[in-house]
Amino acid sequence: MFSVGDKIVYPMHGAGVIREIEEKEILGQKRFYYILQLPGNDMNVMIPVDMEQTAGIRRIVSQDMLQEVEDLLRAESTPMASNWNRRHRENMEKLRSGDILQVAEVVRNLIRSDRRKNLAAGEKKMLAGALQILISELVLAGNMDIGDARRLIEESV
């Protein structure tokens, strides 16, 4: 179980700080929830404590891991499926994994694809979400602000 003040990653939402653990009744069911505050965002995310294992929640990466993320962003793009549906499904699986390196790979590949040819609306939306997820963890793990995290990504890709 995590505690108030812990920095965690909730796949598909990003990294945040647990501001409180609160019992709430929703649809007639009482449960404890982590109230997660995402950086640069007034939005709180409620995560059922009993879903901790199945939701893929993990602690943020150490600062040492940030160099590995930066190296991956600089590395060659990995091949993506030419079929849009397959490419979308593969990228969504990587984002759902919650693994920062897989998220960084999606960000890198989509940014480079967008630079070569404008992405379709669905992939632009996916890129925006993946960027938010990656930036939130970079901000918390690297003790940087959102602008610095964006610059790090842009300069690395």
Image (cartoon, grey):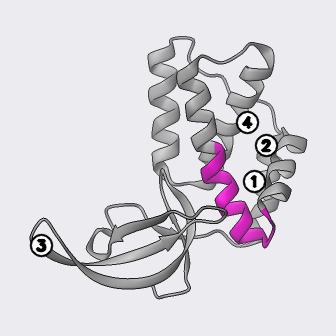
| Nearest-to-viewer mark from 3 and 2 | 3
Pointer 1 residue: 69
- Report x, y in % for residue 84: 51, 15
The residue at which mark 3 appears reads as: 29
Observer-side mark, 4 or 3, equals: 3
Query: In 3D space, how far apart are the residues under numbered discs 4 and 2 (Cα atoms)?
Result: 6 Å
Q: Is residue 93 left or right of residue 77?
A: left
The residue under the point 36% across, 61% down is 55
Q: Earlier in the sequence, mark 4 or mark 2?
A: 2
Answer whether residue 151 is magenta in the image.
Answer: no
Element type at mark 1: helix
Q: Are marks 2 and 1 in contact (CB under 8 Å)?
A: yes
Local secondary structure at mark 2: helix
- For badge 1, the amino acid type reads Val
Residue 154 screen position, x and y as percent = 85, 41
Highlighted range, magenta:
131-145
Q: Are marks 4 and 3 in contact (CB under 8 Å)?
A: no
